[in-house]
Amino acid sequence: MFFAPISKAITEGASNSKDNRAGSGSRWGSSRGCVCLLLLACMGTVQGSAQTQEAAPQFDDLAARAAAARDSGNLPLAIDLYGQAEQVKPDWAEGWFYLGMLQYSANAYPAAIDAFNHLLALQPGVPPGLALRGLCEFETGAYDEALRDLEQAVAKGAANQPRNEQILRYHLAELLTRSSRFQDALAQYKFFTAKNILDEDVLVGLGLAGMRTPLLTKDVAAGDRELYKAAGAAGYTLLEENTQLADRLFTQLFARYPATPGIHFFYGFLLFPHSPDLAIEQFKSEVAIAPGNVEAHAMLAFTLMIAGRYAEAEPEAEMVVAKAPDMEMGQLALGRSLAEIGDVKRGTDLLNQVLQNDPDNLEAHLGLASIYSRTGRREDAYREHMVCRSLAK
C-alpha cells in the first residue's frame, strides 16, 4: 500500500478530541495531545508572571479548585473556575493559558482566542500562546490571522516538539498555500518527507502547493481530490529522492491529465535544483498547455539562463517583463541573458533594478560580477565578488 498510516504519536493525540469537527476537515484537526505538549514545552515561560504575584485567599482557593478540576478531566468545571479566578486576578498569565487550552479542547474557539489574547497582552509573543491562538483562528476561518500567528510561533520555536511540529507545520503549509506563497508551503511539506510521514491530506496539500492552487485541502472539490493526491504522491516521492519512481508517477499523471495545468510546472520546479535541463522540458510543456501562465514562462526563462542558454532565455524573459514588469525572476533572467548576448547596458540596468528592491539577491550580484569582470571594471567586479562571498556564507 503506497500510503502509510500517519505516525502513532499523532493518531494517539488526535484520538483524545473530535477529528472531524466543523472547520477542521481532516484528521489533522487540533488535538489535546498537541496542547499538552505545547504546555509542557513552554510552561516555565507562562508561569513566571503568576509566581511573582501575591494571591488573595479567594484566588488561591479558585486556582487550586480549577487545577484539580483540570487534572480530573472535568472541562466545564475547570473552565468555569479558571474564569472566576481571572475575574479576581486578571493578570494571572498561567490561568489565561489554561483557560484558553481548556476552551480549545472543548472546541470553544472564539472563547479560547479571547483567553489567548489576554495571555499575549501579558506576555507578548509567547510561542504557545501564538501557536494555540493560530490553531483556534484556523478553526474559526480567520485564516490571515492564523497564518500570522502560526508563522511567528514556528519561528519562535513552538514546533520544536516532534508532535507539535507535525500539527503546526501542516496547518502553516495549508495557510501558506491558500495565500499563494507556494514555495514557502513546499518548504513546510519537506518536513513530512524528511520524517517519512504519509497521510492523504498531506499529499493533497502538497499537490495543491506544487500545482499552484490556492486552496485549503478541505475546500478541494470531491472530483479534483484524486488529482491533487496523485500529484502530491509523485512530488513526495521525488522529495524523497526516489527519482525513478517519481518519474513513473509523473509520467502516469501526464497521460491521465494531458491538458491539466500545473502538473508539468510542479515536476519542473522540483527538478530545477538538480537537473535544470530536465526542468526546461517540463516548463516548456507547461507553457504549451497554459500559454498565459507568466510564472511558468518566468521559470522557463530563468532555467534556460541558469543552463547558459541565453539566446533561448532572452525572448521568454522579454515576454515576462512585458507582462509583469516587477517580477524579479523575469528581470534576473532578462538582465543576465541580455548581458551575455551583447546588450550589457540594459542587462546591467535590469540587475541593478532587482537590487533596488532586493539588495541581497545573490543571483543579481553574481550577474553584475560577471559583467564587470568581462568589461574590465576590476574594482566593481571585486566589490561584487566580496558581496557574493558574504551572501553565500
Image: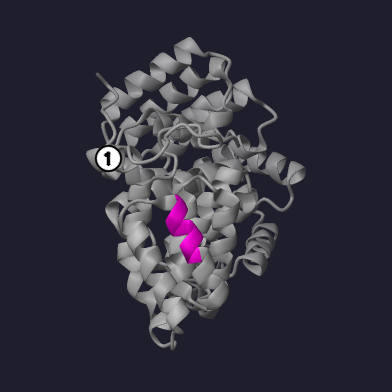
Residue 240 lies within the magenta run: no
Judge whether 63 appears above or below 159 on screen. below
Categorize mark 1 by other alpha carbons within 10 Å: few (<14), some (14-19), many (20+): few
Q: Where is residue 343, by image quadrant?
A: bottom right
**Could one spot residue 363 in this view of the protein?**
no
Residue 78 lies within the magenta run: yes
Front residue of this view, candidates 158 and 128 = 128
Q: Position of residue 226 (x, y in %)?
A: 47, 18
Residue appearing at x 74%, y 50% in the figure: 325
Q: Which residue is mark 1?
A: 12
Residue appearing at x 42%, y 34% in the figure: 19
Q: Position of residue 360 (x, y in %)?
A: 54, 68
Q: Position of residue 297 (x, y in %)?
A: 62, 36
Front residue of this view, candidates 171 and 77 = 77
Tag 1, which secondary structure?
A: helix
Judge whether 56 appears above or below 117 on screen. below
The reply, left or right, for residue 239 in relation to residue 370 is left
Front residue of this view, candidates 6 and 240 = 6
Q: Where is residue 66, by image quadrant?
A: bottom left
Residue appearing at x 29%, y 57% in the figure: 161
Q: Where is residue 193, by image quadrant?
A: top left
The reply, left or right, for residue 117 in relation to residue 325 is left
**Could one spot residue 114 in this view of the protein?**
yes
Quarter in which the N terminus is drawn: top left
Please tell me whether the stretch drawn in magenta is mainly helix, strand or loop. Answer: helix
At label 1, which amino acid type do we have?
Glu
User: Magenta residues, as a range?
Assistant: 76-82
Residue appearing at x 43%, y 60% in the figure: 154
Quarter in which the C terminus is drawn: bottom left
Q: Position of residue 244 (x, y in %)?
A: 27, 25
Judge whether 24 appears above or below 185 on screen. above
Q: Look at the image and name its color scheme.
A: one colour
